[in-house]
Structure formats: C-alpha cells, structure tokens
Amino acid sequence: MKNVKTIFASVVLIALVSISAFAGTGSKVIAVVNEASWCPTCQNNGMRAMETFKENNKDMAIQFVMNDLSTDETKAKSLAELKKVGLDKAMAERKGTGVAYFFDADSKKLINEVSVAKSNEELAEALTTAKKGAK
C-alpha cells in the first residue's frame, strides 16, 4: 500500500511540475526525466528530486517531460510526448531510469544529465548548469 501511495503522490507532483513547465512560454531547456514504477532509485528519490526541480525552476526556463519506462503502454505514451518536443531520437539510446537529461530547447543538444539520487544541492546545480548551457 505504501508503494501505491508513493507512486500516486509522485504522479501528482510530476503532473504539477509538467503542467507548470508547459505553461511557461520561452523555455530554453527541456528536461526529460526517465522514470519507472519498478525503479528503486525513482521510488526512493523521485518525489524529493521533482520537488527540488520545481523549487529551482520558478522562472519556468526548463520544461519538464516525463519519460515513463514502466510498461510498453507507458513507453508508447511517453514516446508521443518526446516526439512533440523533438527529442524522440535523442532519447532513443538513453534508457537509464532515475536520470534527468537536459537538452537545449532549440538545438536539441544534450547539455548535461543528473541522477535523481543526487543531493538537493547537486540537483539544483544541474538546473543552473542547464540554464547556463542553453544557447
């Protein structure tokens, strides 16, 4: 039951971060967060990492896209979202879960990546680095 509550809370938080990020117009960076319901790193760190990302993205410079690798169905839905932002090809080789990948929104080039298991300070620094790395 605890896992179900954790997953549900994660989905709600992720949805809020995604909605707020899409509301911003002029995002310079697209962050793709690979997650899966079966991923221990995601289960243990996902909520904290997403909260840190949200707190450090008040300017909406980074648009978050969740890439759910849990099942074939969630992979297909995530692929459709990746295609919308033009990152389906860039993410084809990046299958590691519990990782956020930061891309320049215009060039679609990878700026940096960070594990959600990193400290809040390291996660915040990854966002700062991504914002500075965008052209």
Image (cartoon, helix red, strand yellow):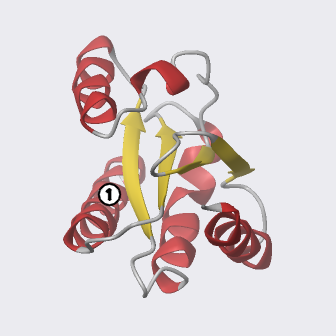
Q: Amino acid at mark 1?
A: Lys
What's the residue at 52%, 16% (across, down)? 92
Instruction: Residue 53 in the image: state x and y as whole percent.
Output: 53, 72
Query: Is 3 situated above or below 67?
Result: below
What's the residue at 61%, 61% (across, down)? 134
Instruction: Residue 23 in the image: state x and y as whole percent.
Output: 20, 72
Q: How many marks on residues?
A: 1
- Along the line of sight, the residue nearer the viewer: 94 or 30: 30
Residue named by callout 1: 5
56 left or right of 13?
Answer: right
What's the residue at 43%, 25% (across, down)? 69
**Crowdedness of circle 1 by 10 Å Cα count: few (<14), some, many (20+)?**
few
- Find numbered disc 1 in the image and state the secondary structure of the residue it sits on: helix
Query: Is 34 situated above or below 132?
Result: above
Q: Toward which corner of the image does residue 109 lie, by quadrant?
A: top right
Q: Toward which corner of the image does residue 22 lie, by quadrant?
A: bottom left
Instruction: Residue 43 in the image: state x and y as whole percent.
Output: 54, 48
Query: Is 78 situated above or below 107?
Result: above
Query: Is 76 situated above or below 107?
Result: above
Instruction: Residue 124 in the image: state x and y as whole percent.
Output: 68, 76
36 left or right of 66?
Answer: right
108 left or right of 119?
Answer: left
Q: Toward which corner of the image does residue 8 lie, by quadrant?
A: bottom left
- Pick out the residue farthest to the top: 72
In which quadrant of the rendered image does the C terminus lie? Answer: bottom right
What's the residue at 57%, 34% (across, down)? 39
